[in-house]
Image (spheres, helix red, strand yellow):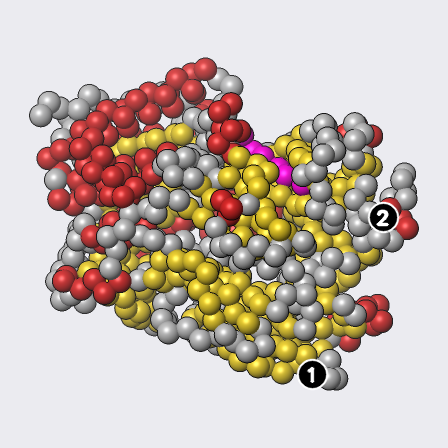
Amino acid sequence: MTDLPLPPRCPKKVKTILEHGETREDPYFWLREKENPEVEKYVREENAYYATVMDRLKDLKTDYFEKLKSRMEPEAIEVPYRHGPFRYGAYIPEGKEYAVYTRSKEESRSLHPADGVVWLDLNEVAKAHDYVSLGGFTPNDAHDLIAYTLDVEGNEIYRLHFISTDARPAPSEIIENVEGDIVYSKNGQYIFYVRLNDQHRPYQVWRHALRTPSTEDLLIFEEKDPRFFTSIQSSTDGEWIFIHLSSAESTEVRYARRGSEKNEAGGESPLFTVFLTRKGSHEYELDAQADRFIVLTNQDEPNFSLGSIPLTEIENGMKSWKPIVIGDARTDVRGFTVFKNHIAVLFAFDGVLGVRIFSQGESRGEKATYDLPFTETIRDVSFSANEEFNAKTIRLKYSSPRTPTQTIEYDLSSGHREVLHERIVHGFRPEDYAVERIEISAADGTKIPVSLIFREIDRGKKLPTLLYGYGSYGMVTPTGFSLLRSVIVDDGFLYAVAHVRGSGDLGQRWYKEGKFLKKKNTFTDFHDVAKALVTSGRTGAGNITLHGGSAGGLLVAATMNLEPSFFRGVIAEVPFVDVLSTMSDETLPLTPTEWDEWGDPRQLEFFRAMREYSPYDQLKAGEYPYLLVNGGWNDPRVTYWEPTKWVAKLRDLRTDDRLTILDIEMGAGHFGVTGRFAALEKPAEMIAFLHAIHFERERLNEN
């Protein structure tokens, strides 16, 4: 096998940055200049080098691609759900890349969406675009007109379209530069939508009169504070419109009744009333159930509590709030869904997900009728499509490492359970896999949960390990079924998921312990988990590869810097690695709102904290693991230059001959390429790389 060509070397153009009286030099700051032909040239050179490396792994990639593809069911379907007089569903036909959206009459009991009438086929849309993503769709109350949003660039900037489902022609106007949310007025003459500003922040709510130019649209609301994002939705009972204003620390909701004079009268601005003014770190969610608002709040409990306020006492705010379910140190109330006579609450007890159903008594008080029964401890549970306020059933999505995704329907009164659909995974046998939850002790004594997935035939063996984590924003680390994970485990790996501080895996207190000035806990937890997997005999030193994306990319990069020689490899997808520079630039789309997550480096204490863990700034000359890094040219969340700068600097500083490869997807954004089978290409390359660095390193000889 011939040697690989030399990797690209990025020219240095040093920029001196002065903050808080301290000077730092950034030789690759210039890579932010997206319109500079020299930048694109360098990125394409990196992509060409990546392709050259992957060519050496072509047979492995092909093998893993076919394994992933062969395990997929011929058609991917979303079971039709009731919405008004129809059932809406979607499926990807056999051999196709994109979904077809259909609907059928409500009385139809078919569980296959192909039995309905097609109203949108994304395969047709994709003929003119390399990237296609449906943001969402909303039918009007009469269900004869559907508004939907499309992103065809990967930059998460959507266009709003209309399609008619009866003989009348649809409105021909297309509204540009919108976010995915759409709400109709009750009379169907108007829609409300959210526009983005130049920094890609959703900040304005507009009202559009159908069949008129968008230049005549009426501005309803504008959010001035760059820390807050704006969204809009209707209440589950269909009687209210809510404008949600949210930062990472606080919430404000404004409400107006659908059908009120000011909402419907042409030329008049709807009157939206503030429910609870944003204040400190108070976060809340709002929905309506006939004569009361249902409010999820963290006002008195970090892990949130759910309660209600009668519409007649709205002006009293939280003084009239009556509890339905109270969170505590072990019970994290994560969400709720409202029905006419029931409320479903999604919660976690010691990190284990559950759903509790409340029914209303004669006095409008709640009583817990039952918790939905689940047998597996490590599981993912979420609400599915529950659009009907009057429904007598609830739909959930359920999966676990050994249970492919199920769509389950429960009778709200009796608890009767029906599995409407279970994903078919060819060649997958649940009994072949072991799933365990262990705890390891962090350096400060904190117990960190770790989920382990491996083959039963490998029980007791010391295995090469892929260690996955995220650990930011209070997000729950996914432990449901994963096609990618099943193929990795079948290759002989131990797959470990670290539930580190900074995640929401053990509630909001757990999240706060890995945030702001305590952010380093996230990285030391991850490092401690890796060490414990070795000392417990589950794997060997130097036989662990780290994997994470976005803020999880920050996690794996910062952990690598703690002890580079301890790890075999790092797979960093769209990694947030240039923390200090990004958080110091308030012109970037997400920076101001991200200050509520990471801190504001204009304050010295946050500046110093970020400098201590920012992966780009902490790179030093020395040996590093094998690295596979990717990004998206159009990514508005983690800009392409973050992984690009990081790779350029790392190549310059590393003193060994291990590979660092970078792949910037030129036609996509944060979430990669679209298309059912096209989306398998990069995972197949990732597994091929993982296999090669653990089992066949000779394939990756470098000059």
Q: Nearer the viewer, mark 1 or mark 2?
A: 1
* Left or right placement of residue 593 versus residue 265 in this view: left
Task: Specify the label residue 80 is tagged with.
Answer: none
The number of numbered discs placed on residues in the rendered structure image is 2
The residues colored magenta run: 146-152
The answer to whether the residues at label 1 and label 2 have Cβ atoms under 8 Å apart is: no
Residue bearing the label numbered 2: 263
Q: Main secondary structure of the magenta part?
A: strand
Q: Residue at x 64, y 73 (%)?
A: 342
Query: Where in the figure is residue 174, as x and y percent of width and height?
Result: 69, 29
Residue 148 shown in magenta:
yes
| Figure check: 84 above or below 12 | below
Q: Earlier in the sequence, mark 1 or mark 2?
A: 2
Q: Residues within 10 Å of mark 2 (few under 14, many from 20)?
A: many
> Residue sitting at 13 percent across and 38 percent down?
697
Residue 144 in view, yes or no: yes
Crowding near pointer 1: few (<14 within 10 Å), some, many (20+)? few
Corner quadrant of residue 328: bottom right
The residue lying toward the viewer, choosing from 118 and 397, is 118
Q: Secondary structure at mark 2?
A: helix
Say whether residue 536 is left or right of residue 264. left
Amino acid type of the residue that numbered disc 1 sits on in the rendered structure: Gly
Q: Position of residue 58 (x, y in %)?
A: 20, 30
Mark 1 lies on a secondary structure that is: loop
Q: Is residue 191 magenta?
A: no
In-front residue for pair 107/195:
107
Q: Residue at x 13, y 44 (%)?
A: 695
Q: Position of residue 536 (x, y in %)?
A: 18, 67
Query: What residue would you read off at disc 1?
Result: 361
Let me know if residue 644 appears in the view.
no
